[in-house]
Image (tube, rainbow, N blue to C red):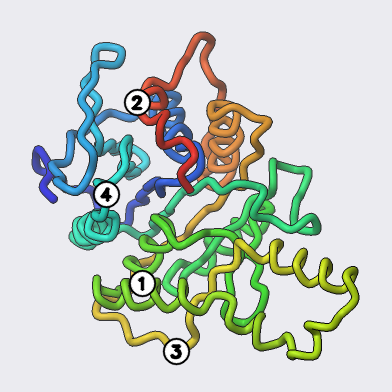
Amino acid sequence: MQFSKPFAPSPGGILLIPAISTGFVSQATLDLIIHQFHIPKIGNFIQYEINPICVSEDGQLRTALELYYDVHQNLSIIQILSTPLEGNSLAFVLDIVKWIRQFQFENIYILSGALSTFRLPSQIETIVPGGKRAIWLKEFPQSRVNQMRSFGWQELEQWKENNIVGIGTGNLLCLLLAVQGYDSDQIKNIIQEIENNSFAEIKKEQPKEKEKEEPKEKQKVEQIEKEKEGLIPILSQQPPPKFAPLPVCSLIYFCSEENSTLQLAEQFAKQLKEIFKWKEEIIIPQMMEWGPRSICQSYSNLY
């Protein structure tokens, strides 16, 4: 991956990057932040694993992969407005992470939307649609973790010691594995094992005698398995990463189908405002439409 011009952010900065997820909510959130705080666009990436787009929006050229930088906040934003070419998702993710490793970012935030339907009834909150959850890697500063917990962000629940609920085996999981330092072959092996064995433990826990259970008991077992469809196990005995892990936090905002993309983006952006102590209010300007949303409409159900 190449960048269109030289880029040299000050060490110790913050990087925001969206995962390709439900309704492109994370992309809309970043566009709202860019618009609200007038963050200048630095340039475009040249990347061959992503579906190309090129449109004019408010007199500005928009492409599939862009970089914005606010020198006053030392804040960098990678904006992704398209999806990887079929079969190229992992190569796309690894290319981005390789580029990120060139710089000394102190905190890296991966933004992601997820459907509330992945949640169990007991996990759905009323504060925001479906709840807000985070995954903190070990290298992410503990002071930041404590700060985010004070704002109501909780660690994503686990069914068991090494199982994570509701993030899928797509773009977000690939990003999380890549920033932990795993290479292409390792990530492929981990995802393959996850897909092959994600419900192995559940099946082992059901003795053959249970085949003769009463209909109500069978329905109960089936319902439990349906509720566990969001289960993604992170393997306990992973091979050691090939590269050094990065200081990453993934912010997962569970979305309700009752809200529009812009409404969800406004809510998500307000959560970020708390974290970064931005003083300006997050407001969607009247008549504002998220242009790239129309470009990515066919991908709006991806997660």
What x and y, as percent, mark residue 102?
18, 60
Judging by the rendered image, the residue that carries numbered circle 3 is 237
Relative placement, left or right, of 275 versus 94 is right
Rate crowding at label 3 as few (under 14), some (14 to 19) or many (20 or more) other CA atoms within 10 Å. Answer: few
Name which of mark 2 and mark 3 comes first in the sequence: 3
Front: mark 4 or 2: 4
CB under 8 Å between discs 1 and 2: no
Which quadrant would residue 36 be assigned to in this image? top left
Judging by the rendered image, the residue that carries numbered circle 1 is 180
Q: Amino acid at mark 3?
A: Gln
Q: Is residue 163 above or below residue 69?
A: below
Judging by the rendered image, the residue that carries numbered circle 4 is 86
Judging by the rendered image, the residue that carries numbered circle 2 is 295
Q: Could you tell me how far apart the alpha carbons at marks 2 and 3 are, in whole angstroms? A: 41 Å
What x and y, as percent, mark residue 50?
23, 43
Q: Amino acid at mark 1?
A: Gln
